[in-house]
Image (spheres, rainbow, N blue to C red):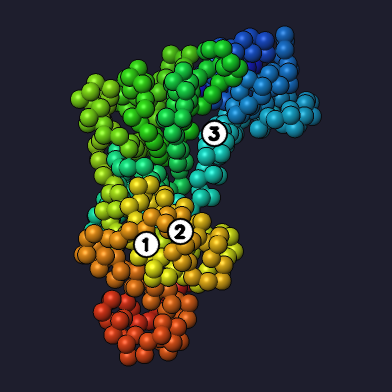
Amino acid sequence: MSYSILVVEDEPVLRQSLAELLSGEGYQVETRGDGQSALDCLLERGFDAIITDVRMPEMDGHTLLGHAQRIAPQTPVIVITAYGTVQSAVAMMRAGACDYLLKPVNFDDLLLKLERALQHRELLTTRQVLTEQLAAESTFHDLVGESPPMTRLFDTVRKLSTVKSTVLLMGESGTGKELFARAIHYNGITRDKPFVAVNCGAIPESLIESELFGHRRGSFTGAIRDKTGYFVAANHGTLFLDEISTLPMPMQSALLRALEQRAVVPVGDTRAQPVDLRIVAASNRNLDQMVEQGTFREDLLYRLAVVRLELPPLRRRRSDIPGLVYHFLGKYTRQMNKHVLGVSNAAMRAMLAHEWRGNVRELENAIERAVIFAEDRTIEIEDLPFASSCGELDDDENLKDALRQFERQHILDCLKRHHYDKAAVAARLGIGTSSLYRKLDELDIPKTPPEKPAPAPEAH
């Protein structure tokens, strides 16, 4: 990526030398001889960094710094000063400048400090989204399931984590599309890069281009400063575009162009900004039908669906329900500091029979609600929000698989709680020790806790 630098220096020889040095290093350089003309330049376009002298005609560097912080607060400013005016440079650093240089300028020192300032700027650009996303529980283990459709999807996620190919996630609301997007991001080459999630349906049509691509100050009413768009904020990481089906046709064309060129043009600018990121799009609507109806671009669908993943609804993988129940039970008992003894057979059977039109999201909400009321006891059928409408499973095979999974998960939970003391576990389950061992063999449950990895040998 070629960074743009504004050099403000009233000495022509030094100004020209700095311009030649930076241009030779691959930077795009604009030069100005005084603070006022530099301010005029800042009002017209944005820069990635500013290098300015302190004492200049028309407007000094301190005043220019104040204007720059209002116009582009994330743009780093490096101050150049003579030895006798070091105090002025220190005052500017207190006011927000990131570093200073003494005359005569050491060019190696300048390049080092400029590189450091640009790295810091990039960190600031993504700091907010990184803080929010990395603090969240966003690991691959948040995806729970042992059914064949899910294990196949997990294998695909592991492969996708090693590349930045565009991915399209299709599935009903609540099937975990954002969780899959996060799993792809956080378990591979982008794990320490930003993950930016955007709900396309929640952005007003008049603002969506600005939100995605950014804008320049003054490009429209209310644009009082440069804005970094989601594409640039997610650079080197992953941009998750949820509800992609809601994009209006003109914006579909702009998105297609950005995907093909791997660059975006902010609103009010004419220069493209290169981006290197993974796009994960998601939709709960049938995009193929929308193409036939003329409401979604076919060429954009091809570009988005380099890899297409169909996420199954929960009713088609009922054997995963017990595992999900215990996953959410552990999550919310920790969050609420509640003591819940488990789930009764009647409550589990009711959850296995429920239709789950809201999929995993509905199940999670049901468990969160149940944990609130089931203090110091097991979750019973009356703790479930749909208790009055509980039905029975039609598919005997689904019921058999799901109950087996429930039984396996329940015994595993008891083993961990009692530190694999078989006698204590058998007593807790109300069965004999020999019956417990038969169950361990039948359900393929390890009889001893998993071994911890051996510590790495010390370096000598």
Tell me if 33 is positioned left or right of 425 in this view. right
Q: Residue 322 versus residue 87: which sits nearer the camera?
A: 322
Mark 3 Cα-neighbour bin, 10 Å: few <14, some 14–19, many ≥20: some
Tell me what residue is drawn at x 22 percent, y 30 percent.
289
Instruction: Reply above or below: 300 against 406.
Output: above
Query: x%, y% of residue 378?
Result: 49, 70
Instruction: State the CA–CA distance, disc 3 to disc 2.
Output: 44 Å
SS category of the residue bearing label 2: loop
Q: How many marks?
A: 3
Instruction: State the CA–CA distance, disc 1 to disc 2.
Output: 9 Å
Residue type at mark 2 is: Leu
Residue type at mark 3 is: Thr
Instruction: Reply above or below: 171 against 356.
Output: above
Q: Which residue is mark 2?
A: 384
Q: Residue 184 versus residue 3: which sits nearer the camera?
A: 184
For marks 1 and 2 on the same chain, the one whose residue lies earlier in the sequence = 1
Q: Looking at the image, do the residues carrying marks 1 and 2 touch, with CB atoms under 8 Å apart?
A: yes
Residue type at mark 1 is: Ala
For marks 3 and 2 on the same chain, the one whose residue lies earlier in the sequence = 3
Mark 2 Cα-neighbour bin, 10 Å: few <14, some 14–19, many ≥20: many
Image quadrant in which the N terminus is located? top left
Q: Which residue is mark 1?
A: 350
Q: Quadrant of residue 264?
A: top left
Closer to the eye: label 3 or 1: 1
- Disc assigned to residue 125: 3
Tell me what residue is drawn at x 54 percent, y 24 percent.
227
Instruction: Reply above or below: 247 against 403.
Output: above
Camera sees residue 400: yes
SS category of the residue bearing label 1: helix
Mark 1 Cα-neighbour bin, 10 Å: few <14, some 14–19, many ≥20: many
